[in-house]
């Protein structure tokens, strides 16, 4: 556990550095927004294109992994949704809370961290999990919020959601890389060097941006945020472990990656959606802050458990 904590600590140290820069005002919110945009559209996209271009669809696709991850995530989603409804929260708020309970910071924190911790072989499983999060659950929150307000789910909502998924830089980067791989053409050396150099900025840039964005978060409504953090950091990896190891067993290495990814703290993009629709942004803000801080310990514990000798 201590050894894993020491491996994970540098990642959180960069997050802490970003938090300090944002909290002190040295790195204002506007700078954080621009850094996030650079990482999201350029650095992380370059990393994903390079990784996926060196993989074939057959190497990446694993139907059992998708079913296992989807089932475990959906189970926790439904628990989060049910608990919110039991507290007599409206459907829109229940959708946001359910999202917090099971969607982690896979793009900005998971991909950079696990490539370094587990090697580039982890990219395939991580990309599949990210695709499930973006395509299904990322669409579901928009459909539920918009549908609950309009009283129905029309073609216009589905069209907007579909276009949003297709325009997502992560989806576009992975798709482009796999298409390039399918063409049979290797990546030219100058292009590969370009992607390596630009992609290298993804890890420190994403971690610093996470920290700087946390500086504007507040820990209000701690009881609910604490419950949602527990769901994300404990229930979600437990559900994925049950599915990936017992119900729908997957390859041991893939199972290790799946459980570790599911232990990531709450994704920052949920706050963006909550703020955009005006649905419980303070609650989401507190959950992201608490789950990220707590994950220093919980994520280390899960990684120590899933790595060889721990399970």
Image (cartoon, rainbow, N blue to C red):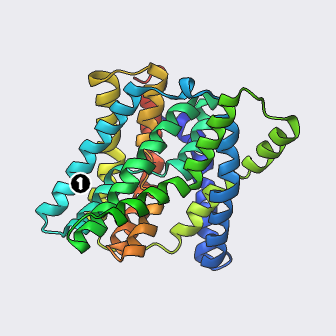
154 lies above or below 50: below
Where is residue 88? Give x, y as percent. Answer: 12, 68
Where is residue 28? Give x, y as percent. Answer: 64, 78
Q: In this view, does 301 lie to the left or right of 57?
A: left
Position of the C terminus by quadrant: top left
Between 301 and 245, the residue placed more toward the observer is 245
Where is residue 110? Give x, y as percent. Answer: 53, 45
Q: At 63% from the left edge and 60% from the top edge, which residue is drawn?
A: 208
Q: Is residue 86 left or right of residue 46?
A: left
Q: Residue furthest right?
A: 190
245 lies above or below 161: above
From this viewpoint, is residue 267 visible? no
Q: At 57% from the left edge and 52% from the top edge, which residue is drawn?
A: 108
From this viewpoint, is residue 50 visible? yes
Q: Name the residue beneath numbered marker 1.
A: 80
Between 182 and 207, the residue placed more toward the observer is 182
Number of callouts in the render? 1
Label 1 CA crowd tier, 10 Å (few <14, some 14–19, many 20+): many
Q: At 16% from the left edge and 55% from the top edge, which residue is drawn?
A: 82
Q: In which quarter of the image is residue 246?
A: top left
Q: Is residue 64 left or right of residue 116?
A: left
Q: Considering the numbered disc 1 on the image, is that residue within a helix, a strand or a loop?
A: helix
Q: At 20% from the left edge and 71% from the top edge, which residue is drawn?
A: 151
Where is residue 251? Give x, y as percent. Answer: 44, 19
């Amino acid at each position: 556990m201590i050894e894993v904590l020491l491996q994970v600590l540098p990642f959180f140290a960069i997050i802490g550095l970003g938090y300090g820069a944002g909290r002190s005002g040295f790195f204002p919110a506007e700078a954080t927004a621009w850094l996030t945009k650079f990482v999201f559209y350029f650095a992380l996209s370059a990393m994903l294109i390079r990784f996926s271009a060196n993989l074939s669809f057959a190497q990446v696709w694993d139907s059992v992994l998708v079913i296992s991850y989807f089932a475990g995530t959906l189970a926790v989603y439904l628990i989060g949704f049910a608990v919110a409804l039991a507290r007599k929260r409206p459907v829109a708020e229940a959708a946001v809370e359910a999202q917090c309970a099971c969607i982690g910071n896979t793009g900005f924190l998971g991909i950079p961290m696990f490539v370094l911790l587990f090697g580039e072989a982890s990219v395939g499983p991580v990309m599949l999990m990210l695709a499930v999060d973006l395509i299904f659950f990322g669409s579901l929150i928009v459909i539920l919020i918009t549908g609950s307000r309009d009283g129905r789910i029309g073609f216009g909502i589905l069209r907007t959601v579909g276009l949003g998924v297709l325009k997502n830089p992560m989806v576009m980067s992975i798709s482009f890389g796999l298409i390039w791989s399918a063409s049979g053409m290797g990546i030219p050396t100058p292009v590969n060097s370009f992607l390596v150099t630009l992609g290298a900025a993804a890890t420190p840039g994403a971690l610093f941006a996470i920290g700087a964005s946390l500086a504007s978060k507040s820990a209000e409504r701690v009881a609910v945020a604490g419950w949602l953090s527990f769901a994300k950091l404990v229930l979600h990896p437990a559900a994925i472990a049950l599915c990936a190891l017992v119900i729908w067993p997957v390859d041991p290495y893939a199972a290790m990656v799946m459980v570790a990814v599911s232990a990531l703290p709450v994704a920052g993009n949920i706050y963006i959606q909550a703020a955009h629709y005006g649905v419980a942004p303070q609650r989401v803000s507190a959950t992201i802050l608490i789950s990220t801080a707590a994950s220093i310990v919980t994520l280390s514990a899960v990684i120590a458990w899933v790595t060889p000798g721990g399970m």
